[in-house]
């Protein structure tokens, strides 16, 4: 029986690490047809030990013989691995709160700051170093392994790895599937009956075809009718921008306001809960200082942001984390993420199709650079992963919007390599949600000071230094 080693980097991640482990334990083929080894790695010994305890209990309960071990040593975890699943983030909400709040303080109109907008650029630069360290370590100890990434900003980081290393890399996101569920609501059909084609940029994709899987019927005419009939304010924060963009560009976008809104200048017109998202009391609170709270986050605009209870119970992050690591066999279920299906398809040479992966374009989406990382459908088999060319072209305005982001990708890689605040400034000034020149410069200085322990050390450069 052949051996297979899967490494989980960022194994302290609750959603992705535990989801991957549940998918691994439920895979019949990985249980019976390979000798499976799972290496759990995290920079936090406490977090990786917590995941290890949960994993060993779960695999024993399912009588799965996989070898599981934990470490804080990256090279040890990666050595001779076949597949590397990565989901990393340091002090996620602490730094996100700065990414989200501070650009708006300086005049940016960004509604989120995770994957797009000025805030996302600091997010990118924080994660680019650790991500490249993982990839470059893989070049030494497991050069043929696949790097399967969940870390955001997805497109920016996957592009850096694909351009700066020789590692095979793919980025995964379930945003397109969220869009399918929105289509199903409008069409009043089961989501499993709906076939789609589409793509674009991660968190900024468009459905170019919607059809009935059984009959092949084009469902866009029905969707158009249903969208017109639907209540104009229904789930407004989540769907209002998407519906407006559909009417403007002719194709329905995904995954929803909180993400597609990161890439356009007019998103705040369609986010009624925006002021609540950024609500804090400056008289009572000094955000991010010692012993002060990190601002609350409404990660999805579909959450009930206007229905907060006066004295909420059982909804804190700490309680959720604690409950996630209480093992109950009856709660183990497939995550519906793509990592384990990809591993099975490549290893056993099965052919499957995926709704969305993030990889270098190479002609899959017309009008975009070949070396830019895009998101669209893919085929996976023993030869690896390849994007399917889109059969319908995206509108010129959408291609133009994505092109801007592709240029920002390049500038951020240059800013990282050259340790240049000026290249970061160039990227920020290109963004549709940029503040003024003076505000952008001041914002960069403040963010670099606030995040100096985790950002690369950047300096202002000018004139010949930029040539």
Image: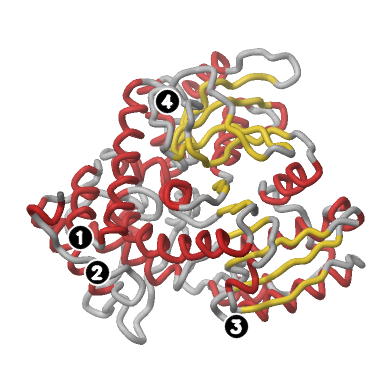
Disc nearer the start of the sequence (1/2): 1
Disc nearer the start of the sequence (1/3): 3
Q: At numbered mark 3, what does the secondary structure look like: helix, strand or loop?
A: helix
**Mark 1 = which residue?**
421
Q: Which mark is residue 448?
A: 2
Point out residue 118 in the picture as x, y percentages from the top left corner: 27, 53
Point out residue 72 in the picture as x, y percentages from the top left corner: 59, 79
Q: At numbered mark 1, what does the secondary structure look like: helix, strand or loop?
A: helix
**Mark 4 = which residue?**
246
Q: Tell me if I can see residue 465 in this picture.
A: yes
Tags 1 and 3 in contact by the CB under 8 Å rule? no
Q: Residues within 10 Å of mark 2 (few under 14, many from 20)?
A: some
Q: Residues within 10 Å of mark 4 (few under 14, many from 20)?
A: some
For image coordinates 72% across by 51% down, the residue present is 340
Disc nearer the start of the sequence (2/4): 4
129 sits left or right of 86 in the view = left
Tags 2 and 3 in contact by the CB under 8 Å rule? no
Tags 1 and 2 in contact by the CB under 8 Å rule? yes
Q: Which mark is residue 110?
A: none
Placement of 245 over or under 82, stated as above or below: above
Q: Nearer the viewer, residue 356 or 324?
A: 356
Task: For marks 1 and 2, give the one nearer the viewer.
Answer: 1
Furthest residue in direction front, as rendered? 140
The residues tagged by marks 2 and 3 sit, at their Cα atoms, a distance apart of 28 Å
Q: Which mark is residue 45?
A: 3
Q: At numbered mark 2, what does the secondary structure look like: helix, strand or loop?
A: helix
Task: For marks 2 and 4, give the one nearer the viewer.
Answer: 2
173 sits left or right of 273 in the view = right
450 sits left or right of 359 in the view = left
């Amino acid at each position: 029986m052949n051996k297979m080693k899967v490494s989980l980097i960022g194994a302290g991640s609750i959603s992705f690490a535990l989801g991957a482990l549940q998918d691994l334990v439920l895979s019949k083929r990985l249980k019976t047809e390979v000798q499976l080894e799972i290496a759990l790695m995290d920079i936090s010994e406490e977090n990786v030990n917590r995941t290890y305890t949960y994993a060993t209990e779960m695999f024993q309960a399912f009588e799965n013989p996989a070898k599981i071990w934990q470490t804080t040593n990256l090279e040890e975890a990666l050595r001779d691995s076949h597949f590397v699943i990565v989901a990393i983030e340091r002090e996620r909400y602490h730094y996100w709160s700065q990414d989200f709040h501070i650009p708006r303080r300086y005049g940016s109109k960004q509604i989120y700051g995770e994957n797009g907008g000025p805030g996302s650029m600091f997010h990118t630069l924080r994660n680019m170093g650790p991500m490249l360290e993982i990839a470059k370590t893989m070049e030494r100890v497991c050069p043929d392994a696949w790097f399967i990434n969940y870390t955001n900003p997805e497109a920016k980081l996957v592009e850096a790895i694909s351009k700066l290393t020789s590692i095979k890399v793919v980025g995964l996101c379930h945003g397109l599937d969220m869009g399918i569920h929105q289509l199903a609501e409008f069409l009043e059909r089961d989501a499993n009956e709906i076939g789609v084609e589409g793509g674009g940029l991660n968190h900024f994709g468009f459905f170019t075809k919607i059809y009935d899987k059984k009959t092949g019927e084009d469902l866009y005419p029905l969707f158009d009718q249903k969208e017109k009939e639907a209540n104009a304010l229904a789930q407004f924060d989540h769907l209002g921008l998407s519906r407006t963009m559909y009417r403007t560009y002719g194709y329905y976008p995904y995954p929803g306001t909180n993400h597609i809104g990161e890439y356009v200048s007019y998103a705040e017109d369609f986010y009624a809960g925006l002021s609540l998202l950024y609500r804090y009391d400056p008289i009572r609170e000094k955000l991010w200082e010692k012993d002060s709270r990190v601002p609350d986050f409404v990660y999805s605009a579909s959450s009930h942001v206007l229905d907060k209870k006066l004295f909420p119970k059982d909804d804190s992050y700490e309680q959720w984390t604690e409950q996630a690591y209480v093992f109950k066999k009856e709660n183990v279920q497939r995550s519906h993420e793509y990592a384990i299906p990809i591993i099975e398809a490549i290893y056993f040479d099965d052919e499957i199709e995926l709704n969305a992966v993030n990889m270098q374009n190479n002609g899959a989406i017309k009008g975009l650079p070949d070396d830019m990382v895009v998101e669209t459908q893919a085929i996976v088999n023993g030869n690896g992963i390849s994007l399917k060319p889109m059969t319908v072209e995206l509108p010129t305005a959408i291609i133009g919007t994505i092109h801007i982001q592709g240029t920002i990708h390049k500038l951020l890689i240059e800013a990282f390599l050259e340790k240049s605040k000026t290249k970061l400034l160039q990227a920020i000034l290109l963004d549709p949600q940029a503040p003024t020149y003076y505000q952008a410069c001041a914002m960069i200085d403040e963010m670099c000071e606030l995040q100096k322990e985790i950002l690369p050390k950047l300096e202002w450069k000018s004139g010949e230094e930029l040539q």
